[in-house]
Amino acid sequence: MKEILFKYMTRFTSMSEEEQQAIMNDIVIEEYKKGTVLLRQGEVPTKCYFVLKGCIRQYSIHEAGKEVTSNFYTEEQAASISNARRRDKPSEYTLVCLEDAVLVVGDIAVEGDMYNKYNQLESLIRQMVEEKFGDVQDEYALFIASTPEERFRSLQQNRPHLIDRVPQHQLASYLGMTPESLSRIKKRVQQDERGK
């Protein structure tokens, strides 16, 4: 599992192998069972995660009781709910493992100490956040401007592994539609693909 993290660190920094190994010795890797809640809506986040294996769902429950899925984090993605301006701000989301997972677990309280100890680590994290932020902006703009079928086709193209890994009702929520609509769209898209 650590080779996934090595690959990721090499992509974003020019750290020597010794520096990477030192960081690897300081990080915590934990295994979690399917269904484990990592953070509940309303709790103050104290941890951040990097997925080595598995799938984490991010969702919230609105006042009317409606559950809305806002993201899925899979291999080589960071799952973090934090607010740099207010560290005591309760989370608006719940994070739960949809599969058995192997995660790098970071403690938000000691983040600064890690940056001081490893100079390039802050640059690595900043680059990861900037890349993810750019992706989120692009995904949101596409989501707003697209039809439900276009959203599904985009998912098929950009994150096809989610279609088989995630329960249909959660996938439908993530795509902003009902499970029945998703079912109809999947059927229509399959028929279109067979007709080609």
Image (spheres, rainbow, N blue to C red):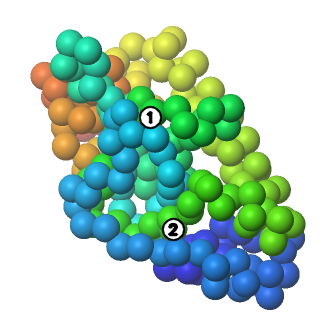
Q: Secondary structure at mark 1?
A: loop
Residue at x-position 52% and y-position 32%: 89
Q: Secondary structure at mark 2?
A: strand
Residue at x-position 35% and y-position 53%: 38
* Depicted 35 relative to depicted 121: above or below: above
Q: Which residue is mark 2?
A: 104
Residue at x-position 51% and y-position 11%: 145
- Of marks 1 and 2, which one's residue comes earlier in the chain? 1
**Image check: 126 left or right of 178?**
right
Amino acid marked by disc 2? Val
**Image check: 65 left or right of 17?**
left
**Image check: 108 left or right of 68?**
right
Q: Nearer the viewer, residue 102 or 134?
A: 102
Q: Position of residue 181 (x, y in %)?
A: 19, 20
Q: Quadrant location of residue 91?
A: top left
Label 2: few (<14), some (14–19) or many (≥20) C-alpha neighbours in 10 Å: many
Q: Which image quarter holds the C terminus?
A: top left
Rendered image: mark on residue 191: none
Q: Quadrant location of residue 26?
A: bottom right
Q: Quadrant location of residue 121?
A: bottom right
Q: Position of residue 28 (x, y in %)?
A: 52, 75
User: For the residues marked 1 and 2, what is the alpha-carbon distance in whole angstroms?
Assistant: 20 Å
Amino acid marked by disc 1? Ser
Q: Is residue 50 visible?
A: no
Q: Which residue is mark 1?
A: 91
Residue at x-position 43% and y-position 55%: 74
- Which of pointers 1 and 2 indicates the residue nearer the eye? 1
